[in-house]
Each structure stands twice: as structure tokens, then as C-alpha cells.
Image: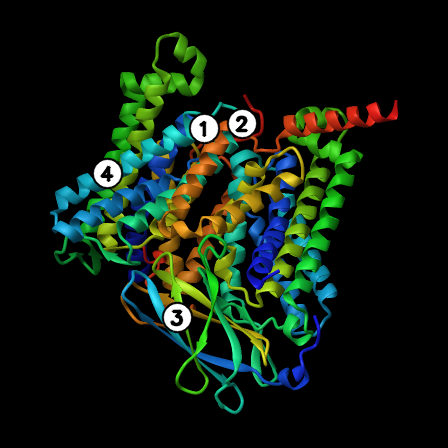
Amino acid sequence: MACLPGSMQAADIRAKADVACQPTAGTLTYVCTIRLTDSRTNEPLTGIDLSVGADMPSMPMMHNVRPVKATPGREKGTYQAHIELEMAGEWALQLNLSGKLRDRLVQVLRFEDGEIAREISPAAPRPARQKH
Amino acid sequence: MDDYLIGVLSNVGVISFIALSAYLLLLIGEISFGQQAFFAIGAYAAGIATALWGWPLAAGLAWGAAVAGAAAVLVGVPTLRLHGLYFAIATLAFAEMVRLLCELFRYQITIDGEPTGPNGADGFRNIRYIFENDIGPLQFLVLIYALLAAALLGFMLMERSRLGVAFRMIGEDVALAGLQGIAVARFKVLAAGLAGALAGIGGGLYAHLTTYVEPRIFDVMLGVHSLAYGLIGGLGTALGPLLGVLIDIGLLESIRSLAGYRMIIFGGVVAFLLIVRPRGLLDETVVHYVRRTWYQIGRGRGN
Amino acid sequence: MIDFVQNTIDGVMIGASYGLLALGFTLIFGVMRRLNLSYGPSIMIGAYLGTLIYVQFSAGPVAVVVMTVLGAVLAGIYVERLCFAPMAASAGIASMVSSFAIWMQLEQAAILILPRHTYPFPPLATGAPLELGPFLLRIDHLMMLACALLLSAGVQYVIYRSRFGLALRAIIGNPVAAHLVGIDVKTSVMLAFAGASAVGGIAGYLVLAIDQQVTPMFGMWATMKGLIAMMIGGLGSIPGAILGGLVLGVVEAHSLWHFGPQVRDLVAYLLLFACLVLRPSGILGDAPAAETSIGRRSA
């Protein structure tokens, strides 16, 4: 792979993301709004090629979503992506950054049909099968 | 190649390692539900080596394979005395223990002002080797397949050697193999160790490919899948499990448009396939036939 | 000391559900000598159908029980027809892998029936728990324990005292000879499978009614708990299945109390691992049963 121009300084920048997914009219389809910021300066990161994929952590090969390109949103440093899931439950969203900055950020969200999905921490207690 | 295709092919390659690992144990007649444990150990060990200790990737992968292989030998000694379902469930129990220990495992170092390393159930994120060293997806794909080719070469050499014969004899009939003077216990532990190391390499590659691992990835689903690949693709040759992985991931990708009915079709196809070919597509009979035909062609040309 | 006794009581009650799951599992394994990984997911199909009529038509408890058991039995027969009936006796591994493929199918079918992740399940008994001195006994727990004991006694009776049980034992001993003396092997095996699924369906109903919620994780959970309890208790033994379930339940309850849910699961698997390595035949099982079961060409 050819070194991208400016990759030397890009290595120093670490991206941080905030994700919220809003349900749309279809079943289990969402518009995810991603806000990318520089983790040090909290400056919004613009002009990044962002693609969004997802898989279920318990079966990453069986249930996954083909990565889709995100489009820049109205606000600076925000991006929007339409995703369609196969089932409700916890999904790990993969944010693939390329272009100005190459990185991959991962966030786990719990999706339920028709509800806003937000990031959760897998370490947090959850209504799991282990309750029995 | 577009990134999507590279991604799918990378997955096929990485999963092939754990499929080969389960296949190696099937050769000696043992069913393991637990190869995902060594995949996990390889992933964590290799990830820690590169992300926390700053090792180069090759050393990290080798370390992952070594730790996984050693763990497989240690577990193999008590469990390989068991057989059949007992062995299968013992490996399952071990693998689940490994997964749950991963959920409790915390080992973090602050790098670049951010805590990095395994963080319990949150998993191990920021295995950033490929970003820091500017390794592109295509380069990583080449690396995966180079290692896979090496593993396959190893299998081919093994099948032609006394070792391969011993493995297959043990798989066919343990008592008879013992009577032929084969040190059954030693060969079984050796096979388990090799299988563990193979899964460990796969795990190391997986960790660096996806850049994050979560304990939940290594649950029973992955183990049963890796076992199924050999059965679907065929038990006659090491290409069988690879074919199984290709069918699994390829078929699932190609029927994406069916969305919610994907698994129903996929499960049905596999069930039907196993009725028609209970030892997989490339079973011993097919492999034998192909080999014989090949030699006959060769002889024809020689005359 | 009070905590110790209360934990033990809770463990026994929860263990009863494990025992019931193991009972169905043992029945299938005893007759087929093969592992049915789709056991839990079949129960889940029943549970989802039960939940469907509860959520959509607010069906009463009796209808939900009937629907759950019926769904589990139908799904069980489907699995038997597709994964077990067409396979040769030597193809045990193929059956097992096939049952895993059908697991994927059943899980997706359940999601198609009810697409959300969590659904409410109607409770069994809502009354206040009984108080026995300082100890509390939940009524639904007691009902579960009673069901476990009654059902295991019933299954034991059918297998060892009825004509059908005699036929099944003949098939277990030697399928060819059983066929020669006029036993309809295929139908008997299918009936045994249906019976095992019905036991599983009842177990599933009780567990979910106590939990009052159902998720797509239930299928895997049921298969795993049934499998662990069956292996601890001893393969092929009916009292062993219940005993294995109770031991698992008690050990889990104590480790949950002291160390939390992650360590609880860890201890459960450690117990299973230790049991297998130290005493593979389980508490009450017979060792050769599984030795020859899914090995390669053990005709």
C-alpha cells in the first residue's frame, strides 16, 4: 500500500465517535448519525471517508451487515449512514475511517425494533439468558 | 478488488484456520466443540504482543500460536483419555471456561494517553498494528493466504508421511492402531497441540484483521461451526474444511437479498447436503477417485 | 447459615428446571445414541408460538402451555425427520452437524414469528412466596420441582413398565433384532423423539413462566443447560438427569451468591469439566453408552 500523503501526521490523530441510530419507517432499518472528533482536542473531524458495517458479537460471521458508505451530515464532523439489520439485539457497529485518517472504531449498540439505539457497554448488566 | 470482496475473502481465510484445526482432530477420530478456545487464546496473546508490548506482527502471531498450542497440549493430556461424546463435551466445557475467563481478564497499559488492552467483557479494542504500520487490506489478505498455503502444504506433507498414516489409523480404529505399535496417546496429544497452534494462528490473524475482539465471539457457535466446515466440505482432504468455509460464507453472502430467510435456506441446504453426503462433498471416496485418475493420467502420459 | 440454606433451596428449585431439560435430552440420547443440538431451539419454537398467542390474542395460561408443548413437539419431529431418520447409524457426526444447521433455521424462524429481542411471557403463579421460618419458597418454584419429579417418574415408568418402553429398550439394545421381532422401529423412535420434545416443552414453559420473558438466546441456553446437567448426572440415566440438574442448580446458586453471574457460569463449566475428567460416566450413568456413540465408524 502506498503511503498516503500526510499519513505521518495522521498517525498521531486518534478519532473518537458518538453514535445514535434513529429508527425509520421500515422494520429494523435505521439512520445512524455518527459524530467524529479528535480524541485529544475534541475538534470535529471532517472530510473523512467513512463506511459503516455491523455484526453480532456472538455470531459475527452469520449475522453481519455489508458496509455502507456514510455521507457527511449538515453539522461539522457528523456523518449519516442507513443500515438495515436482520434481527433485533446487540450489534457491534464498525466505523471504518479512510482517506485523511485510517482507523476503525467499534461501538456496541442494542437495537430494538422502532426504538432509538445507543451505545452500551457490554460489561454493564443486561437482561441476559443467564438470569435463569 | 473492492474492499468488500477483500473483507469477505479475508474472513474466509482466517476462519479456514479454525476449520483446519477441528479437521485435524476429526482425522484422529475426535470431535472437538472447543477449538474456539485456542482461537481466543491466539487472538489475545498475539494482540497483547503487538499492541501492548510493541512486538512485530510475525513475532506476535508466532507467540499466539505457541501459547495456544501449549494450552492445547495441557488440556489434551487429561481430556484425550476420554472419547466420543465425553471428549466433545469436555472440550466444550474448557472452551466456555476460556471465554468466561476472557470476560474477567483485564490487563491494560496506557498508550498514547489511552488505556489499551483486554478489558473484561468490553473486549480488547485498538489492536492497531495494521494502522500504525500502514498495512492495507490487500496486503493483509496476501499475508493470510500465504500462511494458509503454508498450513495446507504442511497438511499435504503430513498426509504423505508416517505421521499422517498414524493419525488416520488412530481415527479409524484406536485399538488396532495401538496393536500396530503406534503410541496412540502421544500421537493424540501431538495432534491436539498442532490443532491448537493452527487455531492460535487463525486467532492472531483475526485479532489484527478486525482490530478488536470480544469474548462473545469465541462462544460455542464458533466451535460448532468450525466442526461443521469439515463435515460440509468433506473429510477426505484438508481442502474439505476450506471448501466448507467457502460454502458457508460464500452462500450466506450471495443470498443476502433474502434477508430474513437467509438462515432458513442455508440451514436447509446444509441439512440436505449431509443427507446426500454424510462425510461431506470431498469425502474419502471422491479423494481416492481423483487421486487414482490423476495417477492414471500421469502413467498414460509417461508411456 | 440462613443464607446457605436459602441458596440451597433456590438452587434445588432452579436445578429442577435443568433436570427437566436434561430429562428430554437423555431420552433422545438414550434412544438415538446421537446428540441433538436442536433440542433447545425446538423448545424455543414452541415458546415463541406460545408467546405469539399470548401477545397477539392475550391467550390464557392453559392455551400457552398447550401451544408451547405442541410447537416443541412439531419442531422436534421436524428435526428428527430431517437430521436423524435419513442418516445411517454410522453417520452420527453428520446427524449432529445437521441438527446444528437446523438450529440456525429454527432460530431464524423464531425471529420471523416475533421480531423483537425481548417479549413478555405470562407468569405461572403471582402469589406471595410461602414462608417457612426464615426461608422463602416461591410457589412457581415449587410447581417446577413437583413437575420435575412427576415427569421423571412418569418417563421412568413408561420406559421400564410399558410395552412401548419395552420396544424402545429393545431398539436401544439392537435395532435390527427389534425390527425382526416386529417392532416398528421408525415410528417408535419418532414417538420417543416427540415425547422428549414434549418434556422439553414443559421444561421450557416453566422456566420462561418463572423468568417472565423470552429472547432468541433461549434456544442455546436450553441446549447448554440440558447438556451440562445430563453429562453431570450420567448419560442415559433418568434419575441421573434430574440429580445432575439439581447438583448443577445448587452449585450455581451458591457461586452466584458469593461471586456473581460470570463466576457462576465459570464454576458450572469447571464442575462439568472436572466431572468428565475424573468420573466420565457421571453420577449415575453407564460408561460405555457414549464411548461408542459418535465415534467414527462404530457400527
Q: Give the SS element for disc 2.
A: loop
Q: How far from the left and from the top, in percent, is residue B62?
A: 73, 60
Calculate the distance from the C-alpha at mark 4 to the C-alpha at mark 2: 32 Å
**On-image quarter of the N terminus of chain C:** bottom left
Residue A73, by quadrant, is: bottom left
Calculate the distance from the C-alpha at mark 2 to the C-alpha at mark 3: 44 Å
Residue A126 visible in the picture? no
Q: Are marks 2 and 1 in contact (CB under 8 Å)?
A: yes
Q: How far from the left and from the top, in percent, is residue A35?
A: 43, 81
Pinpoint the chain carrying mark 2: C
Q: Amino acid at mark 2?
A: Thr
Q: Which residue corresponds to the image point at 45% horizontal and 37% vertical from the top-left? A: B269
- Closer to the eye: label 4 or 2: 4
Mark 1, residue position: C33
Q: Residues within 10 Å of mark 3 (few under 14, many from 20)?
A: few
Q: Could you confirm whether marks 2 and 3 are on the same chain? A: no
Mark 4, residue position: C69
Calculate the distance from the C-alpha at mark 1 to the C-alpha at mark 4: 24 Å
Above or below, B115 against C162 in this view is below
Q: Could you confirm whether marks 4 and 2 are on the same chain? A: yes
Choose the circle earlier in sequence order: 4 or 2: 4
Mark 3, residue position: A124
